[in-house]
Amino acid sequence: MIRYITRRLLFAVPTLVAISFVVFALLDLAPSDPTGQLPLTIPPEVRAQIRESFGLDDPFLVRYGKWMEQFFVNEPLNLIEQAFGVEIGNSSERFRVISYATRSPVVDIIAERMPQTLWVVGLSYVVGILIALPIGIISAYRQYSWFDQVGTFVSMVGFSVPTFFTGLLAIILFSVMLEWLPSIYDTTHRVTDLGSFWVQIKQIIMPVMVLAFYNAAQLSRFMRSSVLDNLNLDYVRTARAKGMRERAVLLVHVLRNSMIPVVTMIALGIPTIFGGAIITEQIFRVNGLGQLLIVAIQGADIPMVQTLTFLFAILIVGFNLVADVLYGILDPRIRYE
Amino acid sequence: MNHKHRPVGDGLVPSRAGRVPSRCRRTGASALGDHNAPARERGRPYGPIMATIVAAVLLSACGPDEIVDEVFEAPEVLENRHANILYWQAVSNMNPYLSGGTKEVEAASLVIEPLANYDDNGELVPVLAAEIPTPENGGVSEDLKSITWKLKPDVVWADGTQFTSRDVVFTGEYCLHEEMGCSPEASFTEVETIEALDDFTVRIVFSVPKPFPFGPFVGAITPILQHEQFKDCLGARAPECTAANFGPIGTGPFKVDEFRANDVISFSANERYREPGKPWFKTVTLKGGGDAASAARAVLETGEYDYAWNLQVEPEILEQMMAAGKGEVVVGFGTNVERLVVNQTNADSSLDPERRSLYLDGSNPHPFLADPAVRRALALAIDRDVLIETGYGPTGRVTCNIVPAPIEFASAANESCRVADPDEANRILDEAGWARGEDGVRSRDGVRLSLLYQTSTNSVRQGTQSLIKQMWQEIGVETELRNIDGGVFFGGEHLSEVLRRHRDVHEQLPGDRSGTLYGCLDLRQRSGTGQPMAWHQHVAGLLPRVR
């Protein structure tokens, strides 16, 4: 197992380098201009100078090399310094990945945005799983019952109605008409006591539920079909023939086996939590990573987009590995050699 | 320029939308302090296009005509003296020298101040200066090559230190540093030296006579930075001073408590602000992100925010939201004019790039747009009232003049575009020999009246585009529509490329000065960014060309 993981990790290095090159090159070739957001009063000469100050005049490979150094050497060193309060070398002279738009280190902004995203999108993922698994299991166990029909209908709706619609609907219903919940997420809100915790719940519930609805719809369908596949297998009949209670058959034997593909699915979905839910974040103004990415794209803030995209790539490669490992743990028949 | 511009308007591109012109003290946005709202003008008819800058939404009743400048009564609803402002474009930086976007400049103007600013009528008013230098009071030298600013002696920075001429001189150095890439550098053109004569006197010497010497340190785009805070941030180091760029120490009515890039800024009142009793608000939150329609909703329907800005939203949607009775839309007409820019040089894509869309001293004319009859007909065919009605509602009005505000400088010379007259347009084209072909498109000597019209991606602008296409179809002109993402459309580097790629009509071109037509564009934008007077000197050189 250890050997397998080591091999996979080593193999991930060239993959990531290739991805980093593609990400960098694609964004570099994209026809957008970081000075495009500046007012038209700024004359072309000054724009050229601003672009120069961004380092855009260097040749492509030089910029790629610089970015690699900043991302793989300088930023990790910086993180270590911040975490342990030590200084390694001359840290004030070290160049960091600087955003064009904010002119501040990209990694600091990402760190600032991470909590919102993890709270909202992460929570919605957890809620989504908690809703989807029971629905999927019951729907499969009582196939074609009214519960299954309703579940199928609701998950089809959740699956096909986009979040920008459900989000807007929720805002109009709960914020505009009923005036129960705020439509705008206050990122500066701090939970200090019960009262502020309640405020936090009120502002988080809409985005979380909208996203959870969407996630649950997908997962519950997947869970349902996975349980259905297992229910007809021989080992289930054997278990029943041995006189096991239905509860044990379903929740011990069937569930464990049918979780195998679902766990993979869940693990592979985790990187998307970090990616934020671009649309939902935009609708509720949860200024998390998704919103950061979309603003960066609109403003041609290339270092920000490159760094974020590449971070997502790392997460995807990482969680692919995690999914494979979990697979082996859940299913002892699978052996990595 | 008149007939060449046929502005058609649509709202503005968000980032360069004008400044928020509404100053409704009742509710607050401008009880924020003294930062100047830009030129705005009311009650004047506007020319060729519709001019709308900004539709501002305020919480309480306060129409555009109700400006209370000196005293205002505190609204009882706002007991907690907290203002919630929503900019749907988030602020990314608080240093206008690094990032000159409207949103950044406006956010920074709550904290840092220039020497002088403009009032609603485009008049200079002293801010950190004791008085406006003029030739009469000796502030502007006779040869017009230097200007001497006297500073207010009793101004302190928010950290308690004295504001002196050293800060002004330093700010000049900061912007003019060669590695800087200073965005408002255009305000500093031809500046030779900036020197402190004593602690409260600054002299700026220009290399040429400046009839209008109010470039540096006038207007919100060139505020004064604190020397102490920024002294290690010169040149290439400027972007690295994140703490300073996110939280500049200022002399203005507010100070930054917390800055989250592209998200939210918390301000609190600067207790050392020089004007007693101001600012009225104790705290201000400026939130960013989302889109214009939901920003309008947060003010008009849910009432979570007190003020939202730059609402380029279709009029019927705004009206629906206003029906909730929680707020109202306030429109301040400023200097932004939506317009079409016609390429009069040959943009044929088969031409080699050395010639395509270049003026070449007039030897490279557009096959048909160089014909005044065609341009006149295109202008006449557009029903601007329809464009306003569908795209702008109360936030736009027709203007036929490119400088519609402030009142002192606004021109009312052109009124001819107000009434659309497709019959006359057809007559003009018939007379000029452009005959309709079988497909209804006019042509002459094998040249078809078929053009490409591009704009930035935006639902209002694209709506305008398709309406104009129909209007032109009626006079036998074929139009192909294209829209390009704003970040690309307004991007400087790619602009010249865009120009060369066979584009006949552009809406809202940025300030490329290479062609005859483009030079005039940035006039309006200059005023749009709070310098209503800066166009003086430019106009002088341009008028002969523009006419």
Image: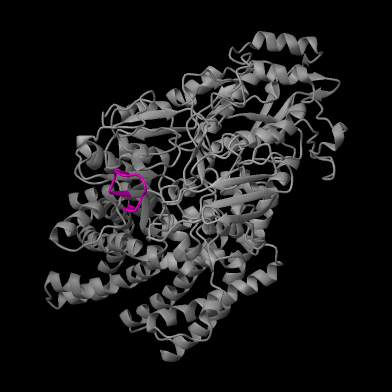
Figure check: B331 above or below B15: above
Q: x%, y% of residue A218?
A: 34, 57
| Residue in front for this viewpoint, A266 or A276 | A276
| Residue in front for this viewpoint, B134 or B269 | B134
On screen, residue A330 versus residue A289, left or right, reads left
On screen, residue A129 versus residue B512, left or right, reads left
Q: x%, y% of residue B294?
A: 36, 40
Tally of numbered tags: 0
The residue drawn where x is 16% and y is 75% is A241
| Residue in front for this viewpoint, A25 or B33 | B33
Residue farthest to the right? Answer: B363
Q: Main secondary structure of the magenta part?
A: loop
Quarter of the figure with residue A264: bottom left
Quarter of the figure with residue A26: bottom right
Q: Give the image's coloring scheme.
A: one colour
Figure check: A81 above or below B27: below
Q: x%, y% of residue B89?
A: 45, 47
The magenta segment: B269-284
Can residue B121 be seen here? The reply is: yes
On screen, residue A12 versus residue B65, left or right, reads right
Figure check: B240 above or below B100: below
Can residue B264 be found in the magenta stretch? no
Q: x%, y% of residue B537?
A: 69, 35
Figure check: A264 above or below B309: below
On screen, residue A130 versus residue B68, left or right, reads left
Can residue A162 be seen here? The reply is: no
Can residue B282 be found in the magenta stretch? yes
Task: Tell me the quadrant of the picture where the N terminus of chain A can be found.
Answer: bottom left
